[in-house]
Amino acid sequence: MANYESKNHRGYHRDRNQRPHQDQRRARQTERVQVEVGQRFPLTIKRMGINGEGIGYYKRMAVFVPGALTNEEAVVEVTSVATRYLRAKVHRIRKTSPHRVEPRDSYADQVGGFELEHLDYPAQLAFKRDVVAQALERYQPEGFHSYDLRPTLGMKDPYGYRNKAQFQVRRNAEGQVEAGLYAERSHDLIDLPTCSVQMPVTMTVMRAVVAMLQDLDMPIYDEEQKSGIVKTLVVRAAAHTDDVQLVFITNSPKLPHKRELLERIANELPQVTSVMQNINPGETSLVWGDDTRHLAGAEAITEKLGDLTFKLSARAFLQLNPAQTEVLYDEAKKALDLQPGQTVVDAYAGIGTIGLSLADVAAEVRGMEIIPEAVDDANANAAANGITNAHYEVGTAEDLLPKWVMAGFRPDAIVVDPPRTGLDATLIETILAIRPSKLVYVSCNPSTLAKDLVDLTADYRVEYIQSVDMMPQTARCEAVVKLTRRQ
Ligand code: SAH
């Protein structure tokens, strides 16, 4: 989860460079404001920030209020005080937004991933376009005032879309096995018996397995005692083939009652086609360990995207919303508008989903990705789909693109789909040096997108930005940017 601190920090630095007087005034202003945690005051919400929180101003200090909506008037209670902003929670809403709806999930305000479930869906889509606009306003890439920001493409039914549930398990004080997510900024587990954004089959399997762990009195990992075995359950379903994979992430290779457990899964959960175990010993902030073992059924599941078939191993990355993934890739394809005979680079390729969908038009597809298993999957997926003009390599985009260029490969087009951190500076330099005529930026973070556009617009024009809602009910926002080389 991104935090406010770093994002705002970056924004203020920029302000400081550009408008020293205003910033000094603001600093003086801040010194005079005396606020304490627990203090309450009325606040009008002016807009919503990138993480879906309401933002209002108390004596000209920004106040971030999770759960509050634009134009609402609320009495808020300060929860933390930083130098230049406050965080607060809603004490009481005095004027409610007409866009406020009752969340389907009772725990929506406690765990991450439900930041907008209290906002009606059309307003969620408008918010996501606005987040892009806000990011552009902050970083001001060339010509940003006149960018064509297209309305966000959303879902008809914005629930039940998530193909993967990755839930922590624990035994509560009463000895019940629970599975769910941590409350925000804590390690308190919130049990999730139902979840409106999950594909129903993922929850059916999850809860049935939780009941089995209970019945078999399985040793559940205890964070404090650092003992026990089962840490996390992962269920991933393929939307177009009905394959379902179940993964037990465990503290040790040992899995007590393994035979009974697998027997019950085979008998009671025929929808599960693959059972795996991943071993992640000890205390670690990472969910997955390096060692993945096969327990039953197939080793991988198969998913279809468009006309292509993809084999997914347990750790392979796949977009979480299968229906919107097709929308996103169609938009990427449309923006790229590849002509027969052109060569294309699929940078940050994952298992090759974007590049392989371009292979029928392209003369050659080359992709890179840092996770070796994903690259193996990408090459295997090419072969399985009869694609012979696509090739994936292990490495960073910033290392491999310059190498390929040195070796004489100059792509006509590049698609980049970086993680939330955005593009590496070296990669941007290389793109600006080789100037492919077409560039498409698929972004999952408007802030880093806007920042990268500052550099890219030196040589590229932004034709349009199409936001796509891959994660309804969350504040997450994806966008496809069509860039063309300036003459
Ligand atoms: N295009 C894919 C994956 C996008 S997620 C899809 O649509 O499914 C971003 C991917 O970039 C992840 O798989 C991550 O492992 C990879 N990655 C992260 N840093 C990278 C870098 N510096 N160079 C290349 N790939 C990177």
Image (cartoon, rainbow, N blue to C red):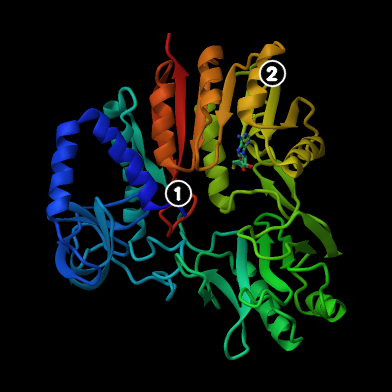
Tell me where residue 480 appears, x and y as whole percent.
Answer: 47, 35
At 64% from the left and 19% from the top, the residue drawn is 402
The secondary structure type at the circle numbered 1 is loop
Residue 97: x and y in percent read 22, 63
Q: 20 or 421, which is in the foreground?
A: 20
Residue name at image x 69 percent, y 58 percent: 288
Can residue 270 be seen from the camera position used here? yes
What is the CA distance from the residue labelled 2 to the residue labelled 1?
Answer: 34 Å
Q: Quadrant of the C terminus?
A: top left
* Residue 160 left/right relative to 341: left
For label 2, the SS is helix
Q: Residue furthest right?
A: 259
Q: Residues within 10 Å of mark 1 (few under 14, many from 20)?
A: many
| Marking on residue 114 | none
Mark closest to the chain's N terminus, 2 or 1:
2
Residue 201, given in percent of the width and then of the height, sits at 64, 68
Depth order, front residue of 208/427: 427
| Farthest residue, direction top | 487
Residue 404 image label: 2
The answer to whether residue 430 is left or right of residue 75 is: right
Q: Tell me what residue is drawn at x 58 percent, y 91 percent.
A: 174
* Badge 1 amino acid: Asp
Based on the displayed image, in which of its 4 quarters is residue 12 positioned?
top left
Q: Which residue is mark 1?
A: 469
Nearest the eye: 424 or 381 = 424
